[in-house]
Image (cartoon, rainbow, N blue to C red):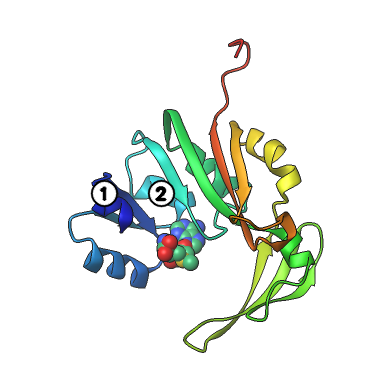
Amino acid sequence: MPLAQAGVELVLVDAHPGMVAHLRRRLPRVEVHQGLIEELDRELEPERRFDLVLVPSNILDRADLLGAAARRLAPGGRLAFELTNPHWLVAGGSERFRVLELDRARARIEVDYPDGTLQEGELELVWPEQVEAWLAGAGLELARMFGHPAAELAESPTFYVVATPAPPPGSGS
Ligand SMILES: C[S@@+](CC[C@H](N)C(=O)[O-])C[C@H]1O[C@@H](n2cnc3c(N)ncnc32)[C@H](O)[C@@H]1O
């Protein structure tokens, strides 16, 4: 909403029909697509590219998803996304976001939602220490990485990554 209100031209994507209906209700003049980011070519012409791709909520936690988002960047574009912080999970999560099982690669979690729903799920883990190598696999390089304001790394439930397309090999930069 703040981006739309500031006059930023937006293209919105969500897999869930309920979220898509909600977005269309709140932003009737904005382009909204229903689909999985990893199958976006079915929805959006493959040549469409964006200066900024923003992905909240630990969605880009698999290489195919990261690659699908990276392919949508215009030259000089930026990909900004949020990941669950494995260090925060190791430190115990929170009362509403409980860790049931955890190893280096994944976590099984249980979440209490404000509407009273209880959901169990599995997360792929991307550790902040692995981010640069992981971005390189999608042809990206790290521009910035940070946690929540004023939180130590282990106290930040999620962290943010800003990446740019890596210069082609041999380009000298
Ligand atoms: C916590 S919600 C965030 C909703 C909203 N974008 C916001 O920031 O308030 C996460 C959303 O990601 C969507 N989602 C999860 N995996 C996805 C995927 N692979 N492709 C597209 N949307 C996905 C879900 O349908 C859900 O609406």
Residue 4 at x, y = what percent? Answer: 27, 52
Q: Nearer the viewer, residue 98 or 136?
A: 98
Residue 164 at x, y = what percent? Answer: 53, 32
- The residue located at (56%, 53%) in the rendering is 82
Q: Amino acid at mark 2?
A: Leu
**Height in image: 9 above or below 136?**
below
Q: Are marks 1 and 2 in contact (CB under 8 Å)?
A: no
Q: Nearer the viewer, residue 5 or 33?
A: 5
- Picture quadrant of residue 173: top right
**Height in image: 21 above or below 171?**
below
Numbered disc in front, either 1 or 2: 1
Residue 92 at x, y = what percent? Answer: 76, 72
Q: Which mark is residue 6?
A: 1
**Quarter of the image that includes the N terminus:** bottom left
Q: Nearer the viewer, residue 64 or 110?
A: 110
Q: Seen in the image, is 44 located left or right of residue 155?
A: left
- Which residue is farthest right? 103
Q: Label 2: few (<14), some or many (≥20) within 10 Å?
A: some
- The residue located at (62%, 11%) in the rendering is 170
Residue under pointer 2: 40
Between discs 1 and 2, the one toward the N terminus: 1
Query: The residue tagged with tag 2: helix, strand or loop?
Result: helix
User: Number of labelled discs?
Assistant: 2
- The residue located at (29%, 48%) in the rendering is 10
Residue 95 at x, y = what percent? Answer: 67, 81
